[in-house]
């Protein structure tokens, strides 16, 4: 089937480049819906969606955007409208992917459009700030793709055509090849880290599949947590086993390795049953390229690889984190059961390992007993999180929910 790509950009200043992208897509057998998000100027030829239609979708007008006298305010109007229209077009089955082009202004808008579309819809952004630290993690949709718009800020040339043509081919190819996340079995959403740190998924996957579930495990290093939350927001999971929460500790202390401020909220907001445990919530993760701040220099330390390294949370920080976890879970509209493994929350938290801190672990367990309140349930599991006994405890909770109909194996 022919695939249609939504091509977004400021057609007043980047008419040639956007036209080239559209021609590349059509030349490969795709179709295009063009969306102009300009404010001041006009394209050389009409686009499928005009700037006036975009502003109107935001409940505003181009005149209002111009009269504001503030380019940031004006572009945010266009971003709201563009995101709303992208959602509408996809919901109507009129587009199969999006491709946006821009500098910092266009990229800012493009990130909102990408977040407006569900996981599984191809999203490609050609940007002068691709992969830049200017872009915070929580602005990135989980499956976004970016390529640097090299050498093309003012006009077409051989260098920028290379980037543009790759982007056109990539988004159209993805639209043709993608298997959207639709399953015939109910899905258990699970968070974890690599098996050198957290191992429960190796104990749980087969028993969960034997019970009739599909299991999707998300790597809780920022983007994975965002993908998990995005699917929870869509109501994709029958239940979740949210057993890796380092992203919340990272958020608390200001580490860039976080999944945004809404972590541990969307499953609860949708009423999805949650089994939760503070796996790896004793550590703060830092990018491997940055120095450990002086405030953490005397903490337990583990260099995982050249991309990520970790320092330990103090006992008081762990208590504060548990209170934050409890506050997020308190807002849940569905059942919540917290499992607190009293012998350790990740592999390096064992005796003899670099993050071993029995006093900190005891403080975390004590605060759990104080902070987790009904209707949420709390079970102190007398084992390490990587022991078979922890997986057995999680399965026992799920089996109870299956028995009373809280969770079903009917898709």
Image (tube, rainbow, N blue to C red):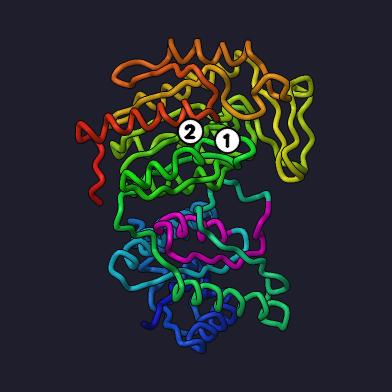
Q: Is residue 96 above or below residue 61?
A: below
Q: Which residue is mark 2?
A: 243
Region of the chain picked out in magenta, as a range: 105-132
Secondary structure, mark 2, is: strand
Of residues 264 and 394, the one drawn nearer to the viewer in this rendering? 394
Of residues 140 and 42, the one drawn nearer to the viewer in this rendering? 140
| Residue drawn at the location 51% of the way across and 27% of the way down | 278
Locate residue 15, reporting x and y percent. 55, 79
Q: Is residue 24 visible?
A: yes
Secondary structure, mark 1, is: loop
Was residue 286 drawn as part of the magenta stretch in this picture? no
Residue 313's image quarter?
top right
110 sits to left or right of 294: left
Q: Earlier in the sequence, mark 2 or mark 1?
A: 1
Residue 198's tag is 1
Was residue 131 drawn as part of the magenta stretch in this picture? yes
Locate residue 50, reporting x and y percent. 40, 73
Disc 2 residue crowd, few under 14, some 14–19, many 20+, Cα 10 Å: many
301 sits to left or right of 173: right
Locate residue 208, reporting x and y percent. 38, 42
| Residue drawn at the location 64% of the way across and 28% of the way down | 283
């Amino acid at each position: 089937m022919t695939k249609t790509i939504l091509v977004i950009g400021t057609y007043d200043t980047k008419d040639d480049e956007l036209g080239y992208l559209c021609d590349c897509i059509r030349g490969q057998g795709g179709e295009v819906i063009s969306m102009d998000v300009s404010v001041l100027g006009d394209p050389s030829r009409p686009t499928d969606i005009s700037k006036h239609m975009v502003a109107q979708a935001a409940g505003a007008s181009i005149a209002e955007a111009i009269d504001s006298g503030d380019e940031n305010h004006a572009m945010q109007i266009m971003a709201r409208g563009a995101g709303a229209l992208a959602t509408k077009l996809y919901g109507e089955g009129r587009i199969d992917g999006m491709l946006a082009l821009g500098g910092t202004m266009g990229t800012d808008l493009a990130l909102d459009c990408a977040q407006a579309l569900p996981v599984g819809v191809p999203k490609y952004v050609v940007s002068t700030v691709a992969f830049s630290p200017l872009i915070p993690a929580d602005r990135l949709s989980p499956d976004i793709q970016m390529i640097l718009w090299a050498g093309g800020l003012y006009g077409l040339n051989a260098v920028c055509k290379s980037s543009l043509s790759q982007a056109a081919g990539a988004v159209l190819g993805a639209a043709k090849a993608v298997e959207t996340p639709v399953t015939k079995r109910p899905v258990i959403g699970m968070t974890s880290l690599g098996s050198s740190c957290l191992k429960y998924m190796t104990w749980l996957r087969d028993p969960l599949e034997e019970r009739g579930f599909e299991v999707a495990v998300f790597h809780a290093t920022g983007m994975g947590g965002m993908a998990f939350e995005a699917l929870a927001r869509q109501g994709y999971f029958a239940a979740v086993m949210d057993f890796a929460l380092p992203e919340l500790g990272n958020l608390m202390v200001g580490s860039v390795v976080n999944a945004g401020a809404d972590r541990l909220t969307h499953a609860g907001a949708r009423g999805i049953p949650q089994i939760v445990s503070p796996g790896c919530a004793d550590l703060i993760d830092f990018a491997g390229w940055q120095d450990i701040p002086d405030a953490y220099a005397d903490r337990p330390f583990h260099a995982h690889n050249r991309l990520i390294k970790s320092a330990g949370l103090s006992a008081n920080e762990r208590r504060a984190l548990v209170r934050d976890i409890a506050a997020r879970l308190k807002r849940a509209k569905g059942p919540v059961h917290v499992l607190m493994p009293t012998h350790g929350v990740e592999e390096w938290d064992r005796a003899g390992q670099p993050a071993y801190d029995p006093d900190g672990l005891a403080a975390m367990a004590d605060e759990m007993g104080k902070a987790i309140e009904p209707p949420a349930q709390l079970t102190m599991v007398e084992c390490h999180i990587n022991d078979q006994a922890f997986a057995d405890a999680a399965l026992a909770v799920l089996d109870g929910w299956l028995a009373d109909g809280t969770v079903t194996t009917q898709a």
